Every structure is written in structure tokens, then in C-alpha cells.
Image (cartoon, grey):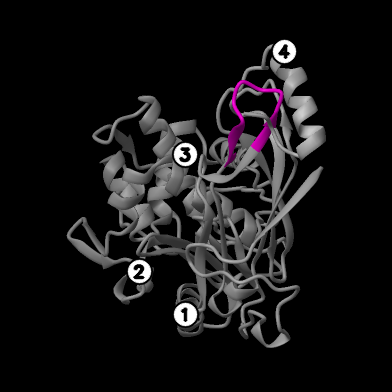
Amino acid sequence: MRKFLILLSLAFGLMASAKAATDTKASIDVKAPQVYLKDLNTGDILLEKNADQKMVPSSMSKIITAYLVFERLKSGDVKLDDTFHVSEYAWGKQGSKTFLPVNAKVSVEDLLKGVIVQSGNDACIVLAEGLSGTEAAFADEATQKAHEMGATNSTFLNSTGWPDEGHLTTAKDLAIIAERTIRDFPKEYEKYYALKEFTFNNIKQGNRNTLLYKNIGADGMKTGHTDSGGYGIVVSAKQGDRRLILVINGLPSSKDRDAEATALINWGFNFWKNYKIFGKGDVVEVADVWSGTEKSVPLVASKDISFTIPRSQRKYLEVKIVYDSPVAAPLKAGDKVGIIEVTVPEKGVYKIPLHAGKDVKMASFFNRINNSIHYLLYGKHGS
């Protein structure tokens, strides 16, 4: 017999309903042509606007440059105190600078700080040439690495984000690279991206990510600006246990960029909340067992089940447990025996496997016959 169990109330007070009221829809006006906002804890997308549209990333490109440096450091190919030569080409690059002296030897760590804090084009090129021989070769590696991550709409033609026809990415791709940076190199992310200033060659420069100076939980990532790309930012912020990643681009001024990014981060934290339905291994239901050495078996969630939804919509979440009862022995812990259906407002129905929580062996032949007769007569197992 197929069994449907609708959970009308969970620990955080969910109530079931057929659909959400129209006045609870999550919306916010945005000026940026491209926007992507994601909750890293649940993986839910809170807002996207032209997120797969190819765009000029400007200096936001530098997050893939920093990622490749972190990778080389982790592999042991280079060390923080290794030094790279400052070529005339790197020294002469225009735009934002770390002001590296030509023909100097500069440590990898100072170069990293120059890239992340000062957005130094010269520092990017020195790293690219030091790691890959030429900036073009480094850019090829950056494109390949981005594609491996799943950022397949990205093509990097240089290490800096300097305007170059065909040097393009998307808001979603930048968010993918940002997330991989945080997940793959959490210590490096915390150490370098949150730096608010860096002094090199007796020149002190503040971090161009001005959101670091605001009380919104921002702890890193990268701004960008070119005439062709407009003003943009990749930013990550953490409040409590939640972390958001935001990418916006194409705004007309740094003031507009900072105001919109601040508003979206605050909206993401204040309007939205994470709700945990079940944790991996949580007992969801105890099911009767047919012809087993045990009369019942716990049914457990196969993974953590959490969603980010507007606070006003939590009462419209519906959780349904579906399985055939009684479940037939033998069972192995981890066997799929049913599904957990979660209906999320405006997102649809998610189906998560429901697993047996422990092994249950098949009963002896005599006990199976006895239980069959008892079940047919009384609808339940014998003693």
C-alpha cells in the first residue's frame, strides 16, 4: 500500500498549503544590467537578471588570476616568498597599479596583495609571466580552469581584465569562480580578500571593494570598471551562518555600484531566510517491515534538506513523505525505500530519496508464513 504522509508542522513551525499567496513574491528593483545573487549554504538562487549574458568583466577578471596563484601555492610549485621579475611590459601597463619598479624582484605574496587589494594590473602581469611564461599562456590556463569549474561562458584573454575584444564572461560564471575560491581556499580567501589596505613601494592604497568598510558582513572579492563594461563587483558577505555571493555589472558609477550592491546584500539577508527541513540521517518516519527480523525500520533523509525562501513564505512550504508500506525485507542501510517531496513556493517540487536507516534481514520461512497469515487477517504483523 502506498503511504503518503504530509507533515503539517516541523520544528520551525511550517504549515502546509496548496500555493503561496501572490503578495509574498520575492522582488526588488535593480538597475544593473546583469545580476546574480546566491546563497552558498543552500545553493538557492535569490535573484538573477541576464545572469548568462556575456559581458565585459573588467577587473573582476582578477579573481581567476588569484585562484590560479592559490592553486600553484597549494601544489607547492611556488611559495609566498618566491620572487618574480617585473618586466618592462608589466611595468608599463596602464590602469590601476601596484607601482612595481621595472626589473625589480617582487615576492609572490606582495604581488597577490597587489592584485587583490590594489587591483594592480602590473602585479597581475608579473604573476602571469612568472607562472606561465607569457600573459597569453596564463590567460589560456585561466579559461581552461574556468571551464573545468563549470564557468563555460568565460573566455579570458589576459590576466587583468584590460579591454580586449573577446575577453568576456557572465555574472553566473564569476559567481562560480568566486564560490570555488571560497570553498577551495578558505584560509587564503580570509587572509587576502578582507585586507582593507596594502602599502608597496611606500605607496599605501585602500581596497577598492568599499563594501568591506560597511557593516553588512562583506569580507571580500573584487570590483571592476572599464568604459565598455561599466561598474561592477563580485562580493561575498557572511552574517551568522549564512554566506551570500553577489555579482552585478554595467552600472554607470561607483556610487551606483556600491548602493545597489549594499541594498542587494541587505535584501538577501533580511528578506530571505534558510529553513532546514531535515539533516542527513535524520529519522523522518518509522515504517512497518514485511517478512523481516525486525517489525519496523527507521526511514532517514539521504542528505541535508534546506531551502532559502522569503521569510513571508515559510508557512507555504509543504513536506510529503511517500513510500510503499510495509517495506519488504531484506533491507540494507542506505536502500532507497521512498521519497521526500518538498513543495517550495515559486520553485516547484523537489524529490529527495528516503533511505532505510539500518539493515533488516529476512525472517525465517516459518515466521514469514505466520506474518503473512496474520497480516491478511488483521492488517498487521503477528507478535
The kind of residue on which mark 3 rests is: Leu
Disc 2: which residue:
217
Query: Callout 3: helix, strand or loop?
Result: helix
The answer to which image quadrant residue 295 occupies is top right
Q: Earlier in the sequence, mark 1 or mark 2?
A: 2
Location of residue 225 in the rendering, given as x and y in whole percent from the top left corner:
52, 70
Q: Estimate how packed mark 2 is, as few (under 14), some (14 to 19) or many (20 or more) residues with alpha carbons within 10 Å.
A: some
Instruction: Tell me the CA gap for discs 1 and 4.
Output: 79 Å
Instruction: Tell me the CA gap for discs 1 and 2.
Output: 19 Å
Disc 1: which residue:
254
Q: Is residue 66 magenta?
A: no
Are the residues flagged by discs 1 and 4 in contact, CB closer than 8 Å?
Answer: no
Instruction: Tell me the CA gap for discs 4 and 2.
Output: 65 Å
Looking at the picture, tell me which residue is in the foreground, 248 or 231: 248
Q: Is residue 151 shown to the viewer in this render?
A: yes
Q: Which residues are magenta?
A: 288-300
Q: Which mark is residue 31?
A: none
Q: Is residue 160 shown to the viewer in this render?
A: no
Residue at x-position 29% and y-position 31%: 79
Q: In what quadrant of the picture does the N terminus appear?
A: top right
Query: Callout 2: helix, strand or loop?
Result: loop
Disc 4: which residue:
366
Q: Earlier in the sequence, mark 3 or mark 2?
A: 3
Looking at the picture, tell me which residue is in the foreground, 200 or 113: 113
Location of residue 231 in the rendering, given as x and y in whole percent from the top left corner:
54, 74
Residue at x-position 35% and y-position 64%: 240
